[in-house]
Image (cartoon, rainbow, N blue to C red):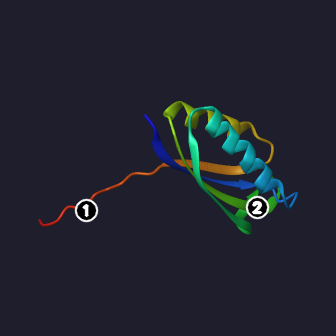
Amino acid sequence: MEMEYEMMYIVKPIEDNLPHEFNDKMSKLIESHGGRVKKADFWGKKRIAYEIKDFAEGDYVLLTFKAPKETVKELDRVMKISEVVLRHMIIRKTNYKKSRGG
């Protein structure tokens, strides 16, 4: 069953086109495993609260996609071993219906 997810990740600020190239790679991975990308937001270079792997800033990307659970596991595995990713987080989006009354 496909669920909707958001993935925020920070890549090393070593090349200007690196966030776009890496996002293309992740989008292809998602699509090859049965998912589809809904939206990619490139937030640009931002200062990080504390240094990660000797980097004080990084390029932030927010990716929204729909995919099966197995795709998310593979995506998480690839992000963990990638040399260019400083940090990443994948969350499942949920739709909560507000109840009225009491």
**Left or right of 75 on screen, residue 82:** right
Q: In whole angstroms, how far apart are the C-alphas of marks 1 and 2? A: 37 Å
Quarter of the picture holding the C terminus: bottom left
| 81 over 21 or under it: above or below | above
The amino acid type, in three-letter code, at marker 2 is Gly
Near-viewer residue (67 or 60): 67
**Left or right of 44 on screen, residue 92:** left
Q: Residue 98 shows which numbered tag?
A: 1
The residue that label 2 is drawn on is: 58
- Disc 2 secondary structure class: strand
Near-viewer residue (16 or 28): 28
Whether label 1 touches label 2, CB < 8 Å: no
| 78 over 18 or under it: above or below | above
The x and y percentages for residue 92 are 47, 47
The amino acid type, in three-letter code, at marker 1 is Lys
The x and y percentages for residue 62 are 62, 58
The part of the image, by quadrant, that contains residue 51 is: bottom right
Q: Residue at x 50, y 34 (%)?
A: 69
Other-residue count near label 1 (Cα within 10 Å), few / some / many at <14 / 14–19 / ≥20: few
Near-viewer residue (71 or 81): 71
Q: Earlier in the sequence, mark 1 or mark 2?
A: 2
Q: Which of marks 1 and 2 is in front?
A: 1
The part of the image, by quadrant, that contains residue 42 is: bottom right
Residue extending farthest to the right is 15
Quarter of the picture holding the N terminus: top left
The x and y percentages for residue 70 are 54, 30
The x and y percentages for residue 33 are 60, 32
Q: Which residue is drawn at 45% across and 51% down?
A: 93
Residue extending farthest to the left is 102
- Disc 1 secondary structure class: loop
Q: Residue at x 13, y 67 (%)?
A: 101
